[in-house]
Image (tube, rainbow, N blue to C red):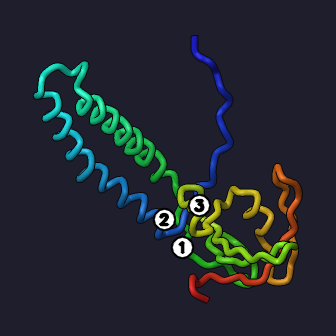
């Protein structure tokens, strides 16, 4: 008998056009380049004989499983995504695709971009539209303050910049 788990909250299906192109490119590369390379390496490792103690065979089999899982995920996820191609009417407020800067009470400044869940990249400051920070910032404008509740407490931020152009 298996354990039943309630399905998790579905992430937003919004994605930027560039993000959708990246995912489609990743799927294409996995199918046309990486998977055939791993299958060839797996076949070569299998030809070496005893598979039970063949580290190369075991590694390639695991690698092939990971690639196949990612291909299945992307194959199901990409058709459900909606690329946001139009800019919002009010470009002074934070909506999907916006770059914005905030200043915290301690004076530190952080830059963020609101993107889809599949584009999340914390090193670049790209946050999911489903994230608490993005939800709290939506519809806010320069000069507005907002609160974000985290396990470490409530943080207050002041919006100092909103842009829909990367280098603006």
Question: Front-most of 166 and 116?
Answer: 166
Question: Front-most of 167 and 27?
Answer: 167
Question: Front-most of 66 and 47?
Answer: 47
Report which residue position mark 3 lands on. Answer: 116
Label located before the other in sequence (3 or 1)? 1
Check the image and report above or below for 76 versus 12. Answer: above
Element assignment for label 2: helix
Report which residue position mark 1 lands on. Answer: 85
Percent x, y of residue 40: 16, 40
Q: Is residue 103 left or right of residue 25?
A: right
**Residue furthest to the bottom:** 168
Label located before the other in sequence (2 or 3)? 2
Image point (60%, 62%), residue name: 122
Inter-mark Cα distance, 1 to 2? 11 Å
Report which residue position mark 2 lands on. Answer: 19
Percent x, y of residue 142: 80, 83
Inter-mark Cα distance, 2 to 3? 8 Å
Q: Quadrant of the N terminus?
A: top right
Tell me the quarter of the picture where residue 38 sits: top left
Front label number (3 vs 1): 3
Element assignment for label 1: loop
Label located before the other in sequence (1 or 2)? 2
């Amino acid at each position: 008998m298996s354990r039943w788990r309630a399905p998790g909250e579905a992430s937003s299906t919004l994605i930027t056009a560039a993000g959708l192109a990246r995912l489609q490119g990743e799927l294409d590369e996995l199918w046309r380049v990486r998977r055939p390379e791993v299958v060839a390496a797996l076949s070569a490792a299998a030809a070496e004989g005893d598979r039970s103690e063949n580290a190369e065979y075991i590694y390639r089999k695991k690698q092939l499983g990971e690639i196949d899982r990612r291909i299945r995920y992307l194959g199901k996820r990409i058709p459900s995504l909606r690329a946001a191609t139009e800019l919002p009417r009010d470009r002074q407020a934070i909506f999907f695709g916006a770059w914005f800067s905030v200043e915290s009470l301690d004076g530190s400044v952080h830059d963020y971009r609101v993107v889809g869940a599949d584009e999340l990249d914390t090193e670049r400051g790209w946050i999911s539209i489903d994230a608490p920070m993005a939800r709290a910032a939506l519809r806010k404008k320069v000069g507005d303050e907002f609160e974000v509740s985290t396990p470490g407490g409530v943080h207050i931020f002041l919006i100092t910049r909103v842009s829909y152009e990367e280098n603006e």
